[in-house]
Image (cartoon, rainbow, N blue to C red):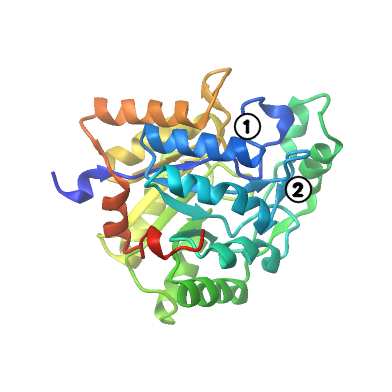
Amino acid sequence: MPLRSKVVITCAVTGSIHTPTMSPYLPLTPDEVAKDAIAAAEAGAAILHLHARDPKDGRPTPDPNVFMEFLPRIKQATNAVVNITTGGGHGMTLQERLAAPLRARPEMCSLNMGSMNFGLYPMLDRYPTFKYEWERRHLENSRDFIFRNTFKDIEHVLHELGEGCGTRFEFECYDVGHLFNLAYMLEQKLYEPPLFLQFVLGILGGVGAELDQLLHMLRTSQRLFGPDIEWSILAAGRHQMALATHNALLGGNVRVGLEDSLYIGPGQLARSNAEQVRKIVRILQELSLTVAKPEEVRTRLALKGAQHVRF
């Protein structure tokens, strides 16, 4: 079976969207993040997409010291590709968002391909009370929040992390315009293929979680970048598994994890990231698709190898 027919599973372990009140299973402390990430890798995730949380109250943090409490443990226990966020969380400066990646010099980082509205506030209606007061502010503030990644910001990340650290990127595209932003960066010789695109569907402010939108993003990408791109999809909330399955049938890769959805089925909270990974592995196997191993991913995405990171 050729490598292109093997599906890469990314697991996004905790993120910066969901809050402690929303699920008792959301990993918050470094120990919880490490254990959940390791279990997800053992279940079949080849890439682990990682954020950090303040262990005192679970709020998103850019503190590299917190990242370094779980990054070495994950590397020692798994062969998975570690992918650190550069998106961080709402309100973080670019310098804060880059602090951990520049210290750790990982094989991969995520990179949002544009500035955008990023609305989390509709979730306020689902929770009458919150465990921590910061959670309510976190959600409400997104009503008047723009996630910033200007052209200058993107150029800075590509230069500092890409050229400076040998890090490759998961290009997160929340709308079709983000694909054209990436095409421009390639025209300017700021990055070289192979590409790994992550279509992000279902965030308020970005493209909707619809099959037509996925097909449009894919066709546009293939026209801009050629037929040999590596692409993946994440779909927020209840759309997670259905659209991941669609994308796998199209020849693409998939992303699951509690950053993107807290559920394993209708009204049923996922008890771990590994539970979601096991579910998508089962779906892929029933479709006669094979799951890619980390070393295959390193070859396909031209990664520098785990021996060249700093954790």
Q: What percent of the width, then of the height, locates residue 113? A: 53, 63
Q: What percent of the width, then of the height, locates residue 61? A: 71, 51
> Do residues under tags 2 and 1 come within 8 Å of each other at their CB atoms?
no
Q: Nearer the viewer, residue 111 or 29?
A: 29
Q: Which residue is mark 1?
A: 26
Q: Quadrant of residue 191?
A: bottom left
Mark 2 surroundings within 10 Å by alpha-carbon count, few (fewer than 14), some (14 through 19), many (20 or more): some
**Mark 2 / mark 1, whichever is N-terminal:** 1
Q: What percent of the width, then of the height, locates residue 65? A: 67, 56
Quarter containing the N terminus: top left
What residue type is disc 1 on?
Answer: Leu
Name the residue located 51 percent from the left edge and 65 percent from the top edge: 105
Please, what secondary structure does the residue beneath circle 2 have?
helix
Q: Which residue is mark 2?
A: 142
Question: Among all residues in the image, which is located at the extreme right?
Answer: 133
Q: Spatial distance from mark 2 to mark 1, Cα to Cα?
A: 21 Å
Q: Is residue 106 placed above or below 216 in the rendered structure?
A: below
Q: Quadrant of residue 116?
A: bottom right
**Is 143 on the left or on the right of 179, as rendered?**
right
Q: Nearer the viewer, residue 3 or 64?
A: 64
Q: Is residue 102 placed above or below 81 in the rendered structure?
A: below
What residue type is disc 2 on?
Answer: Ser
Please, what secondary structure does the residue beneath circle 1 have?
loop
Question: Among all residues in the image, which is located at the extreme top?
Answer: 267
Question: Among all residues in the image, which is located at the extreme bottom?
Answer: 188
